[in-house]
Amino acid sequence: MFGIGTTELLILLGIVIVIFGARSLPELGSGLGKAIKNFKAGVSSKDEIDVTPKPDKATDTDRDS
């Protein structure tokens, strides 16, 4: 896993707990999860608003006359 062993992961986890505190870790994890989920949904889904102009049939028939 990226060349990181168990000892390195435990040290990293300890540093994160010291910096952010044990109480805010669940909030931090859920916020990160929601951000990743919204990013994936935004990248893979269609645009919500289609701003492509649609051809107007009335103006097309006026040009033919």
Image (spheres, grey):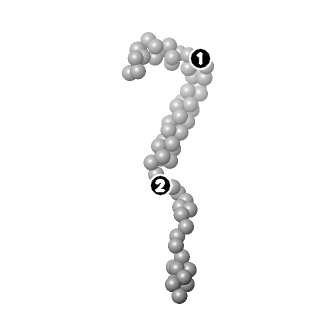
The mark tally for this picture is: 2
Q: Amino acid at mark 2?
A: Lys
Residue at image coords 52%, 70%: 54
Q: Residue furthest bottom?
A: 65
- Image coordinates of residue 5 in percent, x first then y, are 40, 14
Disc 1 from disc 2: Cα separation: 41 Å
Q: Quadrant of residue 52?
A: bottom right
The crowding category of the residue bearing disc 1, from other C-alpha atoms within 10 Å (few below 14, some 14 to 19, many at least 20), is few
Residue 58 seen: no
Residue at image coords 55%, 59%: 49
Q: Amino acid at mark 1?
A: Val
Give the labeled residue for mark 1. Answer: 18
Q: Residue furthest left?
A: 1
Q: In the rendered structure, are the residues bearing label 1 and label 2 in contact, judged by CB atoms less than 8 Å apart?
A: no
The crowding category of the residue bearing disc 2, from other C-alpha atoms within 10 Å (few below 14, some 14 to 19, many at least 20), is few
Residue 28 seen: yes
Report the front residue among 62 and 30.
62
Residue at image coords 55%, 84%: 62
Q: Nearer the viewer, mark 1 or mark 2?
A: 2
Give the labeled residue for mark 2. Answer: 46
- Image coordinates of residue 7 in percent, x first then y, are 44, 11
Residue 4 bears which disc, if any?
none
Residue 55 vertical placement versus 47 (above, below): below
Report the front residue among 50 and 6.
50
**Which callout, 1 or 2, points at the residue further toward the start of the chain?**
1
Under tag 2, what secondary structure? loop
Under tag 1, what secondary structure? helix
Locate the N terminus and report the quarter of the image it occupies. top left
